[in-house]
Image (cartoon, rainbow, N blue to C red):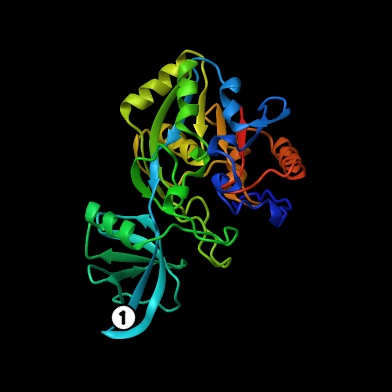
Amino acid sequence: MAAKVIDFYLPDKLNASLPPEKRGIRRDHVRMMVIDRTSGNIDHDCFFHLPQYLQAGDLVILNNSRTIPAVLHAEWLRNKVQLTTNTEIRLARRLGEDLWEALIVEKNVKSGDLFTFSSELSATVIGVKKNSPLSILKFTKKGPNLLNMFYTLGEPVRYEYIDQPWALDYYQTVFASHPGSVEMPSAGRAFSWELLFTLMRKGIQVDFLQLHTGLSYLLDDQWHQTPEENEEEYHISEKTMQRILETKAAGKRVIAVGTTVVRALESAVKFDNLSGVTNLYINDQFPLKIADGIITGFHEPKASHLDMLSAFIPEKHLLRAYDQAIDARYLWHEFGDMNLII
């Protein structure tokens, strides 16, 4: 069954092209729209006031996956013949210690083609996915050594609404510690250590999981990835899950920071597996078992993330809130403002 599309008009001027720090505000001083799950009532506030909306005993779960510089450039060789000197390659998803799915921004890539990134790193195409622009690359390094090369050679994924390159640090959350996301798990970006400590001082619990985000946009509208096609690797520790279950049993709320956290939590329960790869699609028909609220950014028209938000609140409330956000000139995307649904 085709997913229902949640659509609206988003003016270009509301696409955040600058990190908040470059707009003269701290990362935790972006704006925040708060939506009541039950009534649909809307409040307008600033993100650093988040503790006022939570209660002692509530548990905030963040994704501490670290963004890697996933855009690389390489010389393209076929049968030792040079085809290009500067092909762009976007890493999409890690398959193994030396294997990655990647978007190679060229036509007619074939198995056996060689891409040379530097004198120290190259990769061979060992497969081309059917009905997809993604290829499978086998690199000449593996594990941490391969990651180190990505950090040396790569740059962060940047979409067209961000009109200049920013250093990788702008695409990290302050608590990011496990490298693997090709796009920033952006809902956590607005948190500062000061805000996290304020939450904890109020008796609000804070804990972490990992979900390594995949490449969300394949640069050509012909190729639209459904959530089921976007498989992502996640890990939740037993200690964290125990804390989640104890919080639920005590009648307190589990607040997921980002759609990635919701996906990991609900996958763990649905598939009874704390670690693995998930392609879970969450929409208004999905009965949420863990997440009682979500902290997220503002999502673009037709995004599958909007379908997930409709699992928290009715679509009519969501669209009304987004209309208000547009009227109030909230900013969209990873450098934009925040939305608390609780």
Name the residue that disc number 1 marks. 77
* Residue 162 visible, this orientation: yes
The image shows residue 12 at horizontal and vertical percentages of: 69, 57
The image shows residue 342 at horizontal and vertical percentages of: 61, 27
What number of labels is visible? 1
Q: Quick one: label 1, few (<14), some, or many (20+) residues within 10 Å?
A: some
Q: Is residue 71 above or below residue 312?
A: below
Residue closest to the eye, 185 or 284: 185
Q: Residue at x 65, y 49 (%)?
A: 4
Viewed as shown, does residue 100 lie left or right of 193? left
Secondary structure under tag 1 reads: strand
The image shows residue 315 at horizontal and vertical percentages of: 69, 39
Residue closest to the eye, 8 or 336: 336
The furthest residue to the top = 250
Residue closest to the eye, 70 or 209: 70
Q: Residue at x 51, y 50 (%)?
A: 227
Residue 13 occupies which quadrant of the picture? bottom right
Q: Is residue 154 above or below residue 283?
A: below
* Residue 284 visible, this orientation: no
Residue 42 occupies which quadrant of the picture? top right
The furthest residue to the right = 327
Q: Is residue 72 above or below residue 33?
A: below
Which amino acid type corresponds to the residue marked 1 in the rendered image?
A: Leu
Viewed as shown, does residue 42 lie left or right of 133? right
The image shows residue 208 at horizontal and vertical percentages of: 39, 32
Q: Residue at x 69, y 35 (%)?
A: 314
